[in-house]
Every structure is written in structure tokens, then in C-alpha cells.
């Protein structure tokens, strides 16, 4: 998920230190979707069955179920500004009336972003080729979708989601206002939703230096620390040979987001390797600023041969 925002500051911090992680499969628009992990979807709008972590969705009287890292009331959260765990940040608010989504079928989630005056915002800067990035993430971090909603002239957004597994989800909108208060600064807002039903709990995989995703071996190196920016390198190989045919995706050779285990705090890891003519690889650089220690689940999206892959990583931050 850069201009005169905190993202620009991160780019200036490339230096020493490196990071350790783990990976496995999801994604967004463009290219031919390809998923290699249950509970993931590339955001193509095509229904994709998910493996549901074990959560009993026992709604309260408002129709919304409570869960770790999510409030039981729609739009209410206990996060702090910038971590994506609130529907309000810097005067901007994520407004939606939906507290639940259907089980096992594609769904449309409609929302608006309002300003301090309560009116819908329509002037968004383009960040990584899009005016707004939208994520759907399950409470145990097994389910992940990254899509790009369409905005109507009145500021009403529509996000097309593939089928969601039963349980608790958090929906994130990330954007940069192009004008008005906070222009040029990143904003991350989110709201919880419930998908009715029961499923099987999936434990967070342990951290490891490398993992395979769709036949690719992804190796992550770095030395992360909570609340500080550190460089991160990702190397791609296939059958032992360096991968040099990474195709541009969202204006870069890979897109990387992270969610904190337990509370689901959001972080975007900014690409430092520029896109040049031709293909990229085998190694990419990122600036990583993870707000707190503990385990993070990283989702690395990259494209080869017109196919979008997602590798899921568990990363421990000291």
C-alpha cells in the first residue's frame, strides 16, 4: 500500500537489518486468478470456497458477533489511529450498514468514506495504481481477499467479494485523500462483519525463513522490531533457479500487507525496488514498519505469466 505521506518517510529508511518469515497462497484484480491455499482468493469476483476457522457465530441482539480483535458492534473498534482497527481516523469515517455477509456465495459490500463534515469523500489520490485498496481478512488470518472497489459519482463504493467462510471477518479500506484535511497522508479504516455458520479453527503457522507458493520458493530476510522501520528482502526461486520474470502488479513487482495476530492490526510494507522496463526479480526490497511486537501474518502478492500468486507468511517481530 507514495508521496508526502508516512510512506515517503519509510522509503528514506533503507539501511541495514533484515527479516525472517514464512509463506503459502491469494489476491486482486488483473491477470488470471490462481489460488493455492484454501481460504484465499485473488479478488477476481469468482466464488472460491474457503476453509473456515472454527468460530461459533453467536450474534448479539444487533446481529453482530464479537471476536478477538473485533468489536461486537458494527463500526466500533478498540484500535488506535493508523493501525486500521477503527472506522474513524483523522476525521474520516468508513460508513456502511452491513453487519453480516452471506455464507458460501459471492457478496457485494457497499460503503462510503465521509469527511469531518459528514459528506462522502470523492477526491482520492492514486496509490499503487488504485484510489482505494480493500481487504477482507478472517479473524484467524487464514482467509484473505484484496480487491479494488468501484466508486459511484456520489462517493458510494461497491466491493465485490468472493465467497467467505463462516466466522468473523474484518474489512479494511486504505486510501490517501487528494485534497482537504490530511491530504497526502495514508488513512486505514475498517469495520467487522460476521458470516453465519461454523468452521474448523486453523492455528497460525510458525515462522520460517522460506516457503513454497504455487511452485515458487520465497525466502524472506530481515530483522524486524516493533514500531521501527527496517528493510526487508524477498528472494524468488523456482526449481532452484532465480526467478527473473516477475511482472508489474499495482505499479510494483510485488504487493505486501501484514496483519497482527490476535488484534488484526494492519500494516502495509512499502516496495523499495522500482519497476523498470521488462521483468523483475529475483530479489525485491521493502520497507517494513510493524507497529508492535508479536506474530504477524504477511500476504505477498506477485504475478508471473499473467497469473497472480499469493504467498502467506508468518513473521515474528521482537
Image (cartoon, rainbow, N blue to C red):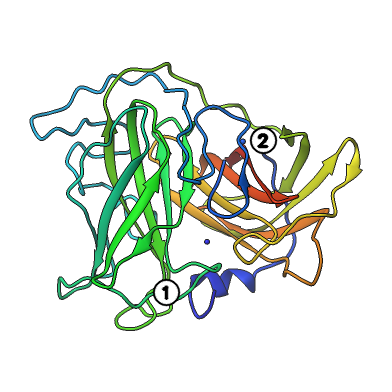
- For marks 1 and 2, give the CA distance: 30 Å
* Secondary-structure class at tag 1: loop
| Residue 19, numbered circle | none
Task: Please report the residue visible at 30 percent of the width from the left and 83 percent of the height from the top.
Answer: 180
**Residues packed near mark 1 inside 10 Å, few (<14), some (14 to 19) or many (20 plus):** some
Against 141, residue 135 (above or below) is: below
Against 92, residue 60 (above or below) is: above
Residue furthest to the right in view is 241
Task: Please report the residue visible at 19 percent of the width from the left and 73 percent of the height from the top.
Answer: 116
Query: Residue 77: x, y in percent?
Result: 25, 47
Query: Residue 255: x, y in percent?
Result: 61, 55
Quarter of the picture containing the C terminus is top right
- Name the foreground residue: 151 vs 61: 151
* Secondary-structure class at tag 2: loop
Look at mark 2 in the image and give the residue it sits on: 22
Residue furthest to the bottom in view is 179
Q: Quadrant of residue 192?
A: top left
Task: Please report the residue visible at 44 percent of the width from the left and 69 percent of the height from the top.
Answer: 131
Against 26, residue 175 (above or below) is: below
**Residues packed near mark 2 inside 10 Å, few (<14), some (14 to 19) or many (20 plus):** many
Against 233, residue 239 (above or below) is: above
In the picture provided, is 197 more to the left or to the right than 186? left
- Which badge, 1 or 2, is on the more N-terminal residue? 2
Q: Is residue 139 visible?
A: yes
Q: Is residue 291 visible?
A: no
Look at mark 1 in the image and give the residue it sits on: 185
In the picture provided, is 16 more to the left or to the right than 1? right
Q: Quadrant of residue 157?
A: bottom left
Task: Please report the residue visible at 23 percent of the width from the left and 39 percent of the height from the top.
Answer: 71
Query: Residue 222: x, y in percent?
Result: 71, 49
Amino acid at each position: 500500500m507514495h508521496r508526502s505521506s508516512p510512506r515517503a518517510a519509510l522509503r528514506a529508511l533503507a539501511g541495514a537489518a533484515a527479516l525472517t518469515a514464512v509463506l503459502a497462497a491469494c489476491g486482486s484484480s488483473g491477470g488470471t486468478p490462481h489460488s493455492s491455499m484454501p481460504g484465499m482468493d485473488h479478488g477476481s469476483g469468482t466464488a472460491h470456497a474457503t476453509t473456515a476457522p472454527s468460530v461459533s457465530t453467536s450474534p448479539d441482539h444487533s446481529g453482530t458477533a464479537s471476536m478477538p480483535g473485533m468489536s461486537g458492534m458494527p463500526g466500533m473498534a478498540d484500535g488506535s489511529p493508523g493501525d486500521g482497527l477503527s472506522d474513524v481516523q483523522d476525521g474520516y469515517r468508513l460508513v456502511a450498514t452491513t453487519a453480516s455477509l452471506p455464507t458460501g456465495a459471492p457478496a457485494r459490500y457497499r460503503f462510503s468514506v465521509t469527511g469531518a463534515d459528514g459528506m462522502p469523500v470523492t477526491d482520492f489520490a492514486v496509490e499503487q495504481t488504485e484510489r482505494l485498496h480493500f481487504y477482507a481478512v478472517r479473524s484467524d488470518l487464514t482467509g484473505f481477499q484484496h480487491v479494488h472497489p468501484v466508486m459511484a459519482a456520489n462517493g458510494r463504493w461497491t466491493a465485490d467479494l468472493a465467497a467467505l467462510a463462516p466466522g468473523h471477518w474484518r474489512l479494511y479500506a486504505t486510501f490517501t485523500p487528494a485534497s482537504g484535511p490530511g491530504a497526502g497522508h495514508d488513512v486505514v479504516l475498517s469495520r467487522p462483519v460476521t458470516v453465519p455458520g461454523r468452521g474448523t479453527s486453523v492455528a497460525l503457522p510458525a515462522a520460517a525463513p522460506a516457503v513454497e507458493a504455487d511452485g515458487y520458493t520465497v525466502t524472506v530476510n530481515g530483522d524486524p522490531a516493533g514500531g521501527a522501520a527496517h528493510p526487508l528482502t524477498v528472494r524468488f526461486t523456482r526449481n532452484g533457479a532465480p526467478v527473473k520474470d516477475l511482472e508489474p502488479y499495482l505499479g510494483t513487482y510485488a504487493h505486501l500487507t501484514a496483519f497482527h495476530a490476535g488484534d488484526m492490526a494492519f500494516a502495509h510494507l512499502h516496495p523499495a525496488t522500482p519497476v523498470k522496463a521488462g521483468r523483475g526479480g529475483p530479489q525485491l526490497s521493502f520497507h517494513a514498519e510493524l507497529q508492535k511486537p508479536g506474530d504477524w501474518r504477511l500476504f505477498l502478492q506477485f504475478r508471473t505469466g499473467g497469473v497472480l500468486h499469493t504467498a502467506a507468511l508468518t513473521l515474528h517481530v521482537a
